[in-house]
Image (cartoon, rainbow, N blue to C red):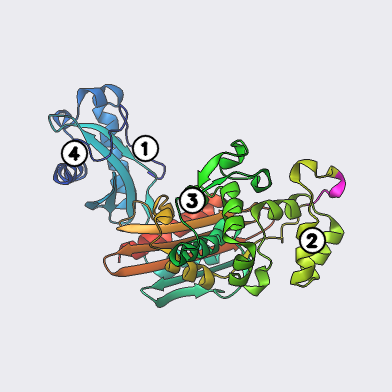
Amino acid sequence: MGSAVLAIAQPLPTPGLGITEADALAAFARVFQATKLEASWFAPTLLGEVPLERLTSSRDELLRSHGAYRGALRDGDRWTVILAHARVPARIALDARGRIRSLFFERAVVVPETLARATAAVAALPGQRAFLILDSGRERAAHDADRPLGVGSAFKLLVLREYAAALRDGRLRADSVVALRPEWRAPGSGMIGTWPAGTPVALGTLAAMMIAISDNTATDALMDVVGRATLDAAAPARSRPLMTTRELHLLRVHPDPQALALWRGGDVAARRGVLAALPPGRDLPLVWGDTLASDIDYLFTSRELCALITQTAERPELRVNPGPAAALGWEWSAYKGGSTDTSISATVLAARGERRVCVSATWNVTPHIARDRFMTAIRGILAVLAAE
């Protein structure tokens, strides 16, 4: 049952309200281990929406497709149901009498038989791809891990690291407030770009939105506050000067052939000149060109991204969005992804006990990426590692 919603009835409850871990585990065990489901186990409201026969057939399909029930693990307000060959993110709620009143299963994540099979799904992607898996510092698998590829918003891990350094040194404070400036507005992901100029925003808010929802305007604002010189010094030489997200957009979407040639072949000073000459996005002449400069991107290696997420893993901003490791059985995870139309990257640091696993993978392809195919492969890698 690859896609899967088993059943849902009534809004899901407030996380942690009215259900103990023991109650939930007992309910999952009844649902998956019983030969026959009993109507008395379910609240009438649920059975009114989803007949017992449908619940039974959906349960049976999960077991046929993914093997026997092996248990369940709590992941915040969510659960991971462990089957022999898959992990299934789930939510459950009980009524006051202990009957199941809401039950929801997301798409099952198939656990490959071996790590080699899991990584083969990434290695088989067309175009250019790279990945690295470090298990408590030990390299478990790698493919072109030192090859720079376009990683989109994953570069924001570097901005986060330098922001965190400025906090430690006392150069910045997370509760310091800045007024949004028009020149910080950037296209693409996020929400702050629509806020009025002059809106007061704390630096901690900018950092959280940069990572959790990849807000581009928040990123450009924080880059300006941290300092372009500081970021350039921290970036790999190949990525200097480190573009703001607005600058990347202007170079990619409205390419001037002469400016692009200078960017591609020039030194750092020449590149700074190209960025300084970029016009405001709203005033950009449409005659600049009609092709996308898809090779213009933030260039990082998988090894560099693993280092960055390891250095920043304790930052609270990285705990808001758990990314592809969610509900696979890890205790916690830090995640930053990034994508353009021709690049996608995912870097995860997942933990259980003292174990720390970094999975970083990047894929560049034209004319465009297949996001679902890439993220399914990453989830498979994290699932097989979690199952070890």
Label 1 crowd bin: few (<14), some (14–19), many (20+), radius 10 Å: some
Q: Amino acid at mark 3?
A: Ser
Q: Cα distance, mark 1 to mark 2?
A: 51 Å
Q: In this rendered view, identify the residue nearer to me: 385 or 75.
A: 75
Horizontally, is 345 left or right of 109 in the view? right
- Residue tagged 4: 19
Drawn side of residue 209 relative to residue 382, left or right? right
In the picture as drawn, the residue positioned furthest to the left comes out as: 97
Amino acid type at image mark 1? Val
Q: CA distance from mark 4 to mark 2?
A: 59 Å
Q: Which residue is mark 3?
A: 176
Q: Disc 2 or 3, which lies upstream in sequence? A: 3
Image side of residue 157 versus residue 58, left or right: right
SS of the residue under disc 2? helix
Q: Are marks 1 and 2 in contact (CB under 8 Å)?
A: no
Mark 4: amino acid: Ile
Q: Find the magenta span and give its range.
A: 287-291
Dot 2 alpha-carbon crowd within 10 angstroms: few under 14, some 14 to 19, many 20 or more: some
Name the residue at 65% across, 53% down: 245
What crowding class fits label 4: few (fewer than 14 Cα within 10 Å), some (14-19), or many (20 or more)? some
- Please give the residue where the numbered disc 2 appears in the rendered image: 274
Mark 4 or 3: in front is 3
Residue at the image position 46 percent from the left and 63 percent from the top: 170
Q: Please tell me whether the stretch drawn in magenta is mainly helix, strand or loop.
A: loop
Element type at mark 4: loop
User: Which residue carries the number 1 mark?
Assistant: 5
Q: Residue at x 49, y 57 (%)?
A: 336
